[in-house]
Image (spheres, rainbow, N blue to C red):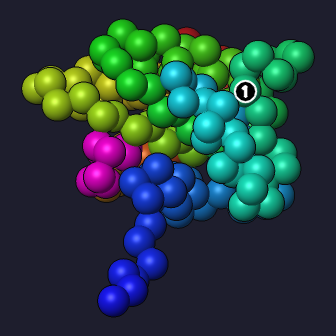
Amino acid sequence: MLQPHCVSSREQVVDTMIELTRLSHQHRAIVAGSDSEELHLALRRRGFIRVATPATCRTARGQHTVGLVTEQGAPAAIEAALAGISPFLCTNAAIAVLIDSRESGVCLKIRNRLEQMGFRIEAGVRCQQGLVLSAYRQGFGQMEKAA
């Protein structure tokens, strides 16, 4: 008997991130984290050609509208990945973060970090590999100028 087509857990995470951030082929996206190369390739296979990593992007000018972070490890590693892509994100950016840790309080730490960066949490979706949080920021540049 044939098994119905089953989506791998990695593909499920990529699909969820695309949907939550409303990533389109016209958007510029930046990916970071320990699985960033795999995520980068998965997006390229889907036809997203405007995808970069902090290592492949020459200057951090706030030109990316979507940030995707997949980090396996401690909250400090996720926070470092967020800090690494923050200069590349525009003032009205969307971000999706995969949190695969089962430790209590990790979600709260990441949520607080995102809020410090000017993001507002919009959704959280449980996947086989963990929780994908999505957040948006609007007018962050205006907040920076006022401070």
Q: What is the secondary structure assignment of the residue under circle 1?
A: loop
Q: Is residue 134 magenta?
A: no
Q: Residue furthest front?
A: 1
Quadrant housing the N terminus: bottom left
Q: Residue furthest bottom?
A: 1
Q: Quadrant of residue 37?
A: top right
- Which residue is located at x 49 percent, y 11 percent? 80
Q: Is residue 26 above or below residue 101?
A: below
Q: Is residue 128 magenta?
A: yes
Q: Which residues are magenta?
A: 126-133
Q: Is residue 72 above or below residue 147?
A: below
Where is residue 97? Give x, y as percent.
44, 37
Left or right: residue 105 versus residue 77 is left
Q: Quadrant of residue 48?
A: bottom right
Assign the magenta stretch its main secondary structure: strand
Q: Quadrant of residue 68?
A: top right
Left or right: residue 113 versus residue 48 is left
- Which residue is located at x 44 percent, y 59 percent? 8
- Which residue is located at x 39 percent, y 25 percent? 72
Task: Name the foreground residue: 66 vs 9.
Answer: 9
Q: Is residue 77 above or below residue 38?
A: above
Q: Is residue 120 above or below residue 79?
A: below
Q: Which residue is mark 1?
A: 53
Which amino acid is tagged 1?
A: Thr
